[in-house]
Image (spheres, grey):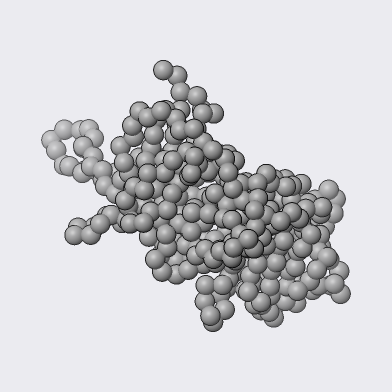
C-alpha cells in the first residue's frame, strides 16, 4: 500500500518514569502545526570487523548504540489562553527547561541543569508507527521579518521496532495560530538596552549537547550533558551615537535581550536574557536591499545565579 508523505503526525507525552511509555493519545498529546518532519528511524554506530583473510572482500559488520533521531518545526505561538501551556510544552521541558505556571496569567520556561523531563513520542508515517522512548533534545528559535516564526526541535530517543498501526486522530488544541514576525505583531525588541533598532532576523539556539549512552550494567538513556546557548541578530546598521556595537565588542561589555512577540493575551511570547546575559562577538557588515546591515553574534551567559541565560514567558 502506498504511503503518503503528507499523512504524518507527532504525539508527545512526558514520562513519569524515564523510558516508560505513558501512552500518548491523539486527543490529548497531538502536536499540531508542525512542518519539516524528518525521522532517522534507525541510527547506529556501524562497527567494521576488518578481518584479515586469504581473500578479498568486505567483513561482516556489527551494529551498536541504536537510537532514533527526529527533527521537526513547530510554529512559535502560545496556547491561546494565558496561564495554559502550549501543546508543545513537554518538548521544551525535554530540552532541559523547567516549567512554571501561574494560573490564568503565564507559563514560563527557564533552563535547568539537572534531571530534565523526558518524553515518549509516537511518529506516525501514514500508518507506520515509530515509538521513541526516553526522548530528550535541543531546539532553536528562528525569527525572521515578514515570516512565520518557528521553533526547530531535534530530539533523540531509544529505538523501538516500528509497527503497522492506524494513524491517530489528532485534536489540535492549546496552539494558537501564529502571527507574522513584523512591526505590527512584534512590538518589543531590546538589545544591549537599545530600543528602536530595526531587526531583520534573530536566531536563538539553546545549544544542548545531547548524547545517547548504552553501557554495561546501566540502563540505556539520552542525556543532556551541556548547554551553550547563542543568539545571532541582523539589524539595520545604526549610527554610532545610537549604539556603538563595535565599542561594546572591543570592551567585552555584557548586555541584555528582550523580544516580545504577539499582541493578544494567550498568544504573547517574551523571549529574554538576564540583565547581563549576552556576550557580544565580532560584528560584521552585510547588505539587504541596498541597505547596510550589521550582523551581531552573541553568546548567552547565565549570571552567578545560574540557569537564567534564556527564558520564554507565555502570557
| Drawn side of residue 101 relative to residue 159, left or right | right
User: Could you tell me which residue is drawn at 33 percent across and 57 percent down?
Assistant: 17
Counting from the top left corner in percent of width and height, residue 181 is at 74, 51
Name the residue nearer the viewer: 100 or 42.
100
Furthest-left residue in this view? 54
> In the picture, which quadrant includes the C terminus?
bottom right
User: Could you tell me which residue is drawn at 86 percent across and 69 percent down?
Assistant: 239
User: Could you tell me which residue is drawn at 53 percent across and 54 percent down?
Assistant: 89
User: Could you tell me which residue is drawn at 38 percent across and 54 percent down?
Assistant: 15
Residue 222 found in image quarter: bottom left
User: Do we see residue 295 in this rendering?
Assistant: no
Counting from the top left corner in percent of width and height, residue 186 is at 76, 56
Counting from the top left corner in percent of width and height, residue 224 is at 41, 62
Residue 122 found in image quarter: top left
Q: Would you place residue 31 above or below residue 286 in this image?
A: above
| Drawn side of residue 67 relative to residue 104, left or right | left
> In the picture, which quadrant includes the N terminus?
top left
Q: Would you place residue 189 above or below residue 274 in this image?
A: above
| Drawn side of residue 4 relative to residue 60, left or right | right
| Marker count (numbered) | 0
Counting from the top left corner in percent of width and height, residue 33 is at 59, 41
Amino acid at each position: 500500500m502506498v504511503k503518503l508523505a503528507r499523512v504524518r503526525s507527532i504525539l508527545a507525552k512526558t514520562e513519569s518514569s524515564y523510558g516508560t511509555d505513558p501512552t500518548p493519545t491523539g486527543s490529548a498529546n497531538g502536536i499540531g502545526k508542525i512542518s519539516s518532519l524528518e525521522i532517522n528511524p534507525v541510527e547506529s554506530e556501524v562497527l567494521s570487523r576488518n578481518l584479515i583473510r586469504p581473500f578479498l572482500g568486505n567483513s561482516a559488520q556489527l551494529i551498536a548504540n541504536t537510537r532514533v533521531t527526529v527533527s521537526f518545526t513547530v510554529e512559535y505561538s502560545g496556547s491561546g489562553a494565558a496561564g495554559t501551556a502550549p501543546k508543545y510544552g513537554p518538548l521544551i521541558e525535554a530540552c532541559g527547561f523547567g516549567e512554571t505556571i501561574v494560573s490564568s496569567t503565564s507559563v514560563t520556561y527557564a533552563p535547568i541543569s539537572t534531571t530534565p523531563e523526558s518524553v515518549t513520542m509516537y511518529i506516525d508515517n501514514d500508518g507506520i508507527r515509530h515509538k521513541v522512548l526516553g526522548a530528550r533534545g535541543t531546539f532553536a528559535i528562528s525569527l525572521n521579518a515578514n515570516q512565520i516564526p518557528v521553533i526547530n526541535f531535534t530530539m533523540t530517543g531509544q529505538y523501538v521496532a516500528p509497527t503497522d498501526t492506524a494513524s491517530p486522530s489528532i485534536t489540535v488544541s492549546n496552539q494558537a495560530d501564529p502571527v507574522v514576525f513584523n512591526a505590527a505583531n512584534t512590538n518589543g525588541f531590546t538589545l544591549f538596552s537599545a530600543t528602536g533598532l530595526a531587526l531583520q532576523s534573530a536566531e536563538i539556539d539553546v545549544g544542548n549537547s545531547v548524547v545517547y549512552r548504552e553501557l554495561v550494567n546501566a540502563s540505556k538513556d539520552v542525556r543532556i550533558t551541556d548547554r551553550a546557548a547563542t543568539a545571532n541578530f541582523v539589524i539595520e546598521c545604526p549610527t554610532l551615537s545610537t549604539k556603538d556595537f563595535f565599542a561594546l565588542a572591543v570592551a567585552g561589555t555584557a548586555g541584555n535581550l528582550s523580544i516580545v512577540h504577539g499582541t493578544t493575551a494567550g498568544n504573547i511570547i517574551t523571549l529574554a536574557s538576564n540583565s547581563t546575559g549576552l556576550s557580544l562577538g565580532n560584528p560584521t557588515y552585510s547588505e539587504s536591499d541596498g541597505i547596510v546591515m550589521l550582523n551581531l553574534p552573541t553568546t548567552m551567559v547565565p549570571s552567578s545565579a545560574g540557569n537564567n541565560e534564556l527564558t520564554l514567558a507565555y502570557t
